[in-house]
Amino acid sequence: MRKILLASTALVAFGTVAANAADVTINGTADWHYFNYDNASSAANSNGSYIDQDMDLDFKFTETTDNGLSLSFAVGVNEGGTMDDQRLDIAGDFGTLRLSNIDEGLADQAMDESVADNTTTLSPLMAMHGSDLNTNTIMYTLPSMSGLTVKAHFQDAGVTSKGDSTAFLAEYSADVSGGSVKAQYISTSIDDTGAASDQSGQDYTTMALRINMNDVQVTASQHNGTENTNTNDLTNNVFDIKYTGIDGIAISAFTLSGDDDKNASYDFNQSAASVTYTIASGLTASLTMTDSEVTSVAGVKSNDDATVLNIKAKF
């Protein structure tokens, strides 16, 4: 009788906790890559292959408070068992306030859609677009206004540096006959560190336009970056097209061209093509081929080619 009473008490207690607990969502991604490359940019002019595997497990807790605020807490765990991202969203009539850790800034929301992200060792001088700081982020999103989204972020570089980052994003989306259109503008400013010898503050801007029409998505963007030292005045022009009109198959093509107004010899060109096949719901296989060519500020030319097989599972 005592065992039955204890069991009943435990069930009632569990039910009470469950009734008051936040909704929990668990998602996972397994990302497997086989790389084969001709790495002409290395000193050894190496050619070879390697296998890379990334795992990510995400837990998300959501709850609505008594006064109508929506709370969302998410945490991610990578293949090494390390928590790689955490964020807290507080949403209401005022918009959404996000408090997050590493690398969650607005630059990562730039529309450039590269199929070549993990396929080559060569990168343009400012990478694809302006960089976020690898630090904690405060982000505020205003309520959407007739298709217009406005966001701002602040990233603190820490007590030993004044090189904080502030950024602003404006994005407009609208439905059109047969599809949709989206325009985006991002402005990012990273301050000098405060050291007497450091004048390396940076400013970045992104302008992008995306058009979806039936089974075709086209994205064009321009990314600019300057430094207070006037050492670099960089521009990356990006064009990406994706076609999904074949059942279970997506075809993508990408091109990036970069130059530097302060260094006439610098030139960067990258192109890639990718085919992705949906094997089953949540399981895809893709093959990507990338060609990258760069002429450094010293006039040295390099060329890298890469072919990548990717198998991705989402749960």
Image (spheres, rainbow, N blue to C red):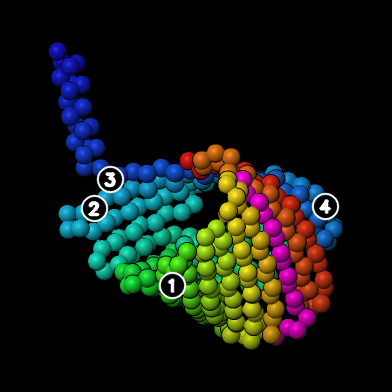
- Mark drawn on residue 22: 3
Q: Nearer the viewer, mark 1 or mark 3?
A: 1
On screen, residue 136 versus residue 299, left or right, reads left
For the residue pair 181 and 269, the one nearer the viewer reads as: 181
Compare residues 186 and 209 and report the one nearer the observer. 209
Q: Secondary structure under badge 3?
A: loop
For the residues labelled 4 and 1, the Cα–Cα distance comes to 42 Å
Query: Marks 4 and 1: CB-CB under 8 Å?
Result: no
For residue 310, above or below residue 211: above
* Residue drawn where x is 65% and y is 79% of the image: 234
| Residue 270 falls within the magenta-colored stretch | yes
Looking at the image, is mark 4 or mark 1 nearer the viewer?
Answer: 1
Mark drawn on residue 64:
2
Label 4 sits on residue: 47
- Report the span colored magenta: 262-277
Give the amino acid at mark 4.
Asn
Tag nearer the camera, 1 or 2: 1
Disc 1 marks which residue?
Answer: 171
Distance from disc 3 to disc 2, alpha carbons, whole Å, reads 8 Å
